[in-house]
């Protein structure tokens, strides 16, 4: 039984370059139109998490990573949406918060849904001391909560553990994202049963050749394959045969001449 797995950072619905309007619904419909079995999404405004199933026709499992806020004050998803509608290109995620979502096609059935925070304060402090992370990087690390979703899903021939994450993006110190990826991998590995296939997907914010964790996960002790040769979006696979990762061409994500998102959807086929 073959599976098409796709991951896409939606850039909060913005075009590239950003415009005053957003195109989130068009993106979700576009990403699901050809019937992928799994569609992992990142940078989803919190207000949209409850609409993903309607837009896609898939089973949507969403989790809030960063809650809507007005500066230091908590806000609501609806207020965040209304404020951002004034100018999406300028405000982006300033008020909406953001989440991750996994969309499942009809060949898959959700059995279990868990989540792990990737940058809790205790973890940041311990890793900061261990790695010698500076004050500025440490403050940046705690600015926005990052989350990994973990699902166990059933298909006709067994079960799969599927993880979707969006790691911290901080170009001045890529060890932040690397540490979060390792934390996610440890959590997923602990959840997986012996011999159970595992997928680790999303915007990992690390690249092959610049990530110690990606290199470690490719070793026999971990057994993951499928890292994208260039780019920060990945579908890492263990226990299944996978095609080479494929980025959808720009023509596939253009609507009325505009390019949707600053990331290209990435996909693999699994057997």
Image (spheres, grey):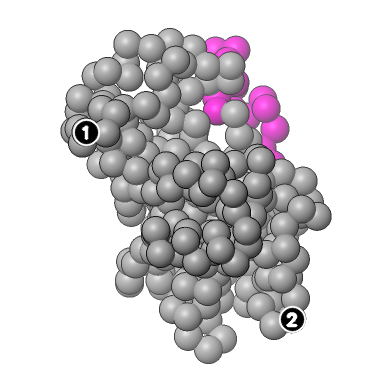
The crowding category of the residue bearing disc 1, from other C-alpha atoms within 10 Å (few below 14, some 14 to 19, many at least 20), is few
Q: Is residue 43 above or below residue 173?
A: above
Foreground of the two, 90 or 203 = 90
Q: Is residue 257 magenta?
A: yes
Tell me which residue sits at (49%, 12%) in the image: 19
Query: x, y (%) of residue 205?
Result: 62, 47
Q: Which residues are magenta?
A: 247-261
Magenta stretch containing residue 102, yes or no? no
Taking the image as shown, residue 89 lies to the left or right of residue 224, namely left
> At numbered mark 2, what does the secondary structure look like: helix, strand or loop?
loop
Q: Residue at x 44, y 38 (%)?
A: 43
Pick whichever, 250 or 233, lies toward us: 233
Quadrant, the C terminus: bottom right
Q: Which mark is residue 47?
A: none
Q: Is residue 169 left or right of residue 209?
A: left
Residue located at (72% from left, 57% from top): 211
Q: Secondary structure at mark 1?
A: strand
Q: Earlier in the sequence, mark 2 or mark 1?
A: 1
Give me the residue at 37% from left, 39% from top.
98
Instruction: Look at discs 2 and 1 and give the one toward the viewer.
Output: 1
Q: Which mark is residue 73?
A: 1
Up the image or down, 266 lies above or below 26; here it is below
Q: As displayed, is residue 226 above or below residue 222?
A: above
Residue 91 can be seen in this image: yes
**Do the CB atoms of the residues marked 2 and 1 lie less than 8 Å apart?**
no
Q: What x and y, as percent, mark residue 212?
A: 72, 63
Instruction: Looking at the picture, tell me which residue is in the foreground, 92 or 31.
Output: 92
Q: Mark 2 sits on what residue?
A: 220
Q: Position of residue 195 (x, y in %)?
A: 56, 86
């Amino acid at each position: 039984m073959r599976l098409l797995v796709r991951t896409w950072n939606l850039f909060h619905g913005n075009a590239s370059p950003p415009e005053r309007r957003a195109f989130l619904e068009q993106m979700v419909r576009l990403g699901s139109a050809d019937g992928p079995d799994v569609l992992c999404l990142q940078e989803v405004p919190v207000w949209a998490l409850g609409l993903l199933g309607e837009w896609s026709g898939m089973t949507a499992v969403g989790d809030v990573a960063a809650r809507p806020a007005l500066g230091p004050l908590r806000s609501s998803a609806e207020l965040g949406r209304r404020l951002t509608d004034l100018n999406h290109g300028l405000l982006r995620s300033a008020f909406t918060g953001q989440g991750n979502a996994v969309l499942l096609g009809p060949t898959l059935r959700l059995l279990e849904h868990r989540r792990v925070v990737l940058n809790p304060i205790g973890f940041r402090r311990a890793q900061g001391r261990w790695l010698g992370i500076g004050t500025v990087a440490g403050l940046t690390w705690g600015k926005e909560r990052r989350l990994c979703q973990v699902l166990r899903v059933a298909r006709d021939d067994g079960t799969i553990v599927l993880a979707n994450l969006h790691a911290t993006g901080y170009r001045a110190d890529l060890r932040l994202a690397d540490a979060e990826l390792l934390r996610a991998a440890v959590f997923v590995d602990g959840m997986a049963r012996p011999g159970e296939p595992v997928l680790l997907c999303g915007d990992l914010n690390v690249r092959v050749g610049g990530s110690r964790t990606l290199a470690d996960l490719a070793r026999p002790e971990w057994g993951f394959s499928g890292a994208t040769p260039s780019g920060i979006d990945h579908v890492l696979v263990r226990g299944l045969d996978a095609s080479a990762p494929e980025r959808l061409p720009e023509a596939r994500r253009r609507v009325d001449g505009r390019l949707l998102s600053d990331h290209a959807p990435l996909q693999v086929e699994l057997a």
